[in-house]
Image (tube, helix red, strand yellow):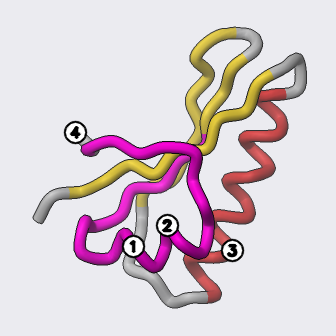
Amino acid sequence: MRKLKLIWDFRGPNANKTAQHHEIHLKEYIKLENLDVSITGTETLNDMHTIAFMVVNENEMKPIRDALKPHRGQVYTE
């Protein structure tokens, strides 16, 4: 089963803190919806750009995408 990484981009001097806060909401959504999702996180790309992400199975992506509206996505490789 292919996994997809749903990504939210945050830019600016507070990008890191905003992305970390967004990850908290992603985890809350996972718990609320009883999803089988165990991979979330943040990655700092530079001092003005940090992403928050969650990894989902491709067959479960559409309703999650529609509900959470990520900025972009990509195939997840470990």
Crowding around mark 3 (Cα neighbors within 10 Å: few <14, some 14 to 19, many 20+) is: few
Magenta highlight range: 52-75
Q: Residue at x 74, y 10 (%)?
A: 47
Image height check: is 25 above or below 77? below
The disc placed on residue 62 is: 1
Tag nearer the camera, 4 or 2: 2
Position above or below: 19 against 39: above
Between circles 3 and 2, the one closer to the viewer is 2
Instruction: Say whether disc 3 or disc 4 marks the residue closer to the N-terminus.
Output: 3
Task: Answer whether labels 3 and 4 touch (C-beta < 8 Å).
Answer: no
Q: How many marks?
A: 4
If you read the primary sequence from the N terminus, does the residue marked by circle 3 or circle 2 appear first? 3
Residue tagged 4: 77
Q: CA distance from mark 1 to mark 2?
A: 5 Å
Check disc 2: other Cα within 10 Å, few if <14, some if 14-19, many if 20+.
Answer: some
User: What amino acid is found at the position of numbered circle 4 in the picture?
Assistant: Thr
- What residue sits 88% from the left and 17% below the top? 13
Say which residue label 2 marks.
65
Name which of mark 4 and mark 2 comes first in the sequence. Answer: 2
Residue 15 picture quarter: top right
Mark 4 residue element? loop
Is residue 68 located in the magenta-colored stretch of the structure?
A: yes
Residue depicted at 38% across the width and 79% down the height: 36
Give how far across and how far down residue 28 sits, in percent. 69, 74
What type is the residue that disc 1 sits on? Lys
Q: Is residue 25 left or right of residue 56?
A: right
Instruction: Name the kind of residue labelled 3 in the image.
Output: Glu
Q: Considering only order in the chain, which callout, 3 or 1, is on the residue closer to the N terminus?
A: 3
Callout in the foreground (4, 1): 1
Location of mark 3 (residue): 28
